[in-house]
Amino acid sequence: MVNDFPTWLNTVIKSLELDDVDKGLVEKLIHEADFDVAENINSHKRQVKPGDRRRKLKPETISQLNSTFSEVLDLLDYEKVPREV
């Protein structure tokens, strides 16, 4: 979604069988989608780029999250960060 919003949106539309969705609305959503967020802890804005957790979380925290959410990560085919501690 973050790296290729138009493709993601079209996949959602097809998956939900929304063939009759207004093309103008789709174009407006694509045009207005902006994931280039400058972080600002005072306004609770965070970078939304995938993998940013590697920079922010301690290896122990990542390992615990991988363990706790292993089933969901596998189901969604998410990459697990190496469990180096």
Image (cartoon, helix red, strand yellow):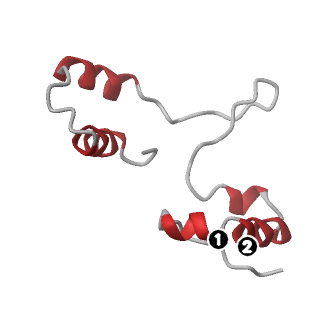
Alpha carbon of mark 2 to alpha carbon of mark 1: how far?
A: 5 Å
- Quadrant showing the N terminus: top left
Q: Is residue 3 above or below residue 27?
A: below
Which residue, given by chain and number where applicable, does mark 2 sit on?
67
Q: Amino acid at mark 1?
A: Ser
Tag 1, which secondary structure? helix
- Quadrant showing the C terminus: bottom right
Q: Would you say 44 lies left or right of 18 here?
A: right
**Badge 2 density bin: few <14, some 14–19, many ≥20, Cα 10 Å:** few
Give the image location of residue 54, x and y in percent. Answer: 70, 63
Comparing 16 with 22, the one in front is: 16
**Residue 70, image quadrant:** bottom right
Q: Would you say 6 lies left or right of 2 here?
A: left
For the point 60% across and 59% down, the residue is: 51
Give the image location of residue 77, x and y in percent. Answer: 47, 68
Give the image location of residue 31, x and y in percent. Answer: 33, 24
Comparing 60 with 35, the one in front is: 60
For the point 77% across and 73% down, the residue is: 63
Contact (Cβ within 8 Å) of mark 2 with mark 1: yes
Which residue, given by chain and number where applicable, does mark 1 sit on?
70
Tag 2, which secondary structure? helix
Q: Is residue 28 above or below residue 54?
A: above
**Residue 27, image quadrant:** top left
Q: What is the number of the mark on residue 17?
A: none
Q: Is residue 31 above or below residue 82?
A: above
Q: Amino acid at mark 2?
A: Ser
For the point 52% across and 66% down, the residue is: 78
